[in-house]
């Protein structure tokens, strides 16, 4: 289904997002599937999928080029929210909010406002 959506909308027409709760990355479900946070009363209370996982799924399973998957997770949401004048791209005058990923698309470092922090996140415990 995601491949069909990608063919119809293209990279410019898709936004990757996450409403991950505090359990994000801790469940045993497969990335992109069975990753809902469900309350005891059966109500869906968010996702356990983190944004880096969504990028990996788009690249590794859907076959989207990395540059386009990153755009779906950065510039597209910023534009949707009217923040693309300062977020979503690396350019002079923009906020220096960056995520550094390894070759397996796992988060290694997060930079906010240009200040970096090494990150050993829960996503590194999940399978590719």
Image (cartoon, rainbow, N blue to C red):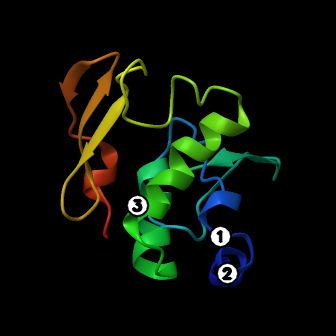
Q: Check residue 67 in the rendering and tell me which mark sits there, or answer none.
A: 3
Q: Under tag 2, what secondary structure?
A: helix
- Lower position in the chain sequence, tag 3 or tag 2: 2
Q: Which percent across, then down, holds residue 32?
A: 55, 68
User: Badge 3 local density, few (<14 within 10 Å), some, or many (20+)?
Assistant: few
Whole-number angstrom distance, CA of label 3 to CA of label 1: 12 Å
| Quadrant in which the N terminus appears | bottom right
The quarter of the displayed image where residue 80 is located: top right
Residue position for label 2: 7
Q: Are marks 2 and 1 in contact (CB under 8 Å)?
A: yes
- Relative placement, left or right, of 73 versus 47 is left
Residue position for label 1: 10
- Lower position in the chain sequence, tag 3 or tag 1: 1
Whole-number angstrom distance, CA of label 2 to CA of label 1: 6 Å
Whole-number angstrom distance, CA of label 3 to CA of label 2: 16 Å
Q: Which percent across, then down, holds residue 108?
A: 20, 43
Q: Under tag 1, what secondary structure?
A: loop
| Quadrant in which the C terminus appears | bottom left
Q: Can residue 27 be seen? A: no
Q: Which percent across, then down, holds residue 31?
A: 47, 67
Query: At x 65% / y 53%, what residue is drawn?
Result: 15
Q: Nearer the viewer, residue 8 or 91?
A: 91
- Relative placement, left or right, of 96 versus 27 is left
Q: Check residue 127 in the rendering and tell me which mark sits there, or answer none.
A: none
């Amino acid at each position: 289904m995601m491949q069909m959506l990608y063919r119809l909308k293209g990279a410019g027409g898709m936004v990757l997002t996450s409403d991950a709760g505090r359990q994000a990355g801790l469940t045993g479900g497969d990335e992109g599937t069975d990753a809902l946070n469900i309350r005891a009363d059966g109500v869906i209370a968010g996702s356990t999928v983190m944004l880096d996982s969504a990028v990996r799924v788009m690249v590794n399973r859907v076959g989207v080029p990395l540059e386009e998957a990153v755009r779906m997770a950065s510039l597209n949401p910023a534009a949707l929210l009217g923040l693309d004048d300062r977020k979503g791209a690396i350019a002079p005058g923009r906020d220096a909010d960056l995520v550094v990923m390894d070759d397996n698309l796992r988060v290694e470092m997060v930079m906010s406002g240009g200040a970096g922090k090494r990150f050993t996140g829960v996503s590194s415990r999940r399978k590719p």
